[in-house]
Image: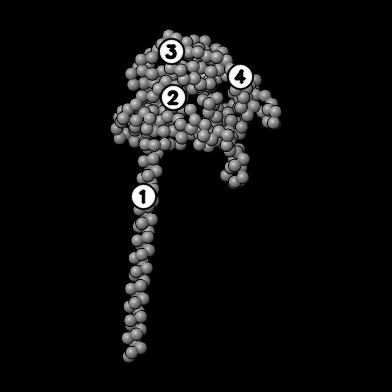
Amino acid sequence: MKSNVGASQLTETTQIETAGVEKSSASEWREYGLFLLKLAAIVLIFRSFVFAPFNIPSESMHPRLLIGDYLLVSKWPYGISRYSLPFSPPLFEGRIFDNPPERGDVVVVHAPGDANVDYIKRVIGLPGDVIQMQAGILEINGKPVKKVRVGDFVTPVTQGMRDAAALEGTEYPCWKPQYEEPAKGGGTQCRYPQYRETLPEGKSYLSLDIEPYQKGDDTEAKIVPEGQLLLMGDNRDRSADSRYPADGVWIGLVPTENLVGRAQFVVFSTDGSARWLLPWTWFSAARWDRVGKGF
């Protein structure tokens, strides 16, 4: 009899202890789930209102940005619009805390229309400005922007450039074969004519004007309407920007509502030769000297 009572007590104790373990395990899973929800909320808020990543897939911002650069884009300088948010939900129109960009800022914008594409360009025309290109010279409000020839822009041909050329349906990573030449350390490199432009407010930057008489070198004078921006790529012959109306290639004028943010600095850069199944190539493909470059 005594033995049976002891067995009964042992069974009851074991059941209580087991229930306690199950309760503790369920609590831990709830806490873990709550932690993941909080983390997701923090990431969403950070990406929506603070910084977002952006990678460079084309040559339109040569020489400042190379194919394979990864940037951080700040969201707060110009205020917040629906395009600042992930997936651009139509929650509201216009901008909250609107703060217009300055001429010369390098910005990321959402393409006008239905295309779910972001572009990175330089702000050239502000509302009320009259912008025109004549023989490759930028004119702002009737005055030519200072443009001085400097040393050539030389950049090694990378796998990323070859891949981008293939997507365009060409085999020439330097746009045309006459701009590709042997590099001293082996391989090949692109060499382009380079200029320094200085805007009326004093901000200067390097630009490329590779060949004369290209589309975009001569345009009609265009008045930038209120609430819109005229954007241009620094690589004038390789950027389909706001110099012409939107037609599926050129992007036309861009509403200020479509501003995503301002480019801040390069956080990583790769030449495109890395392979997922070969981990050591993740490091050999990195261009560490470009990390931290700002605007």
Dot 4 falls on a residue whose secondary structure is: strand
Dot 1 falls on a residue whose secondary structure is: helix
Residue at the location (68% across, 27% down)?
183
Task: Specify whether 97 is left or right of 270.
Answer: left
Residue at the location (55% across, 29% down)?
66
* First in sequence: mark 4 vs mark 1: 1
Q: CA distance from mark 4 to mark 1?
A: 53 Å
* First in sequence: mark 3 vs mark 4: 3
Residue at the far top: name it: 142
Q: Between tags 1 and 3, which lies in front?
A: 3
Q: Which labelled disc corresponds to residue 105?
A: 2
Residue assigned mark 3? 140
Residue assigned mark 1? 37
Q: Amino acid at mark 4?
A: Gly
Q: Please tell me how crowded label 1 is: few (under 14), some (14-19), or many (20+) other residues with Cα within 10 Å.
A: few
Which image quarter is the N terminus in? bottom left
Asked if the residue at tag 3 contacts the one at tag 1, i.e. Cβ–Cβ closer than 8 Å, the answer is no
Could you tell me residue 5's position as x and y percent? 32, 86
State whether residue 242 appears in this view.
no
Residue assigned mark 4? 151
* First in sequence: mark 2 vs mark 4: 2
Q: Amino acid at mark 3?
A: Ile
Q: CA distance from mark 1 to mark 3?
A: 50 Å
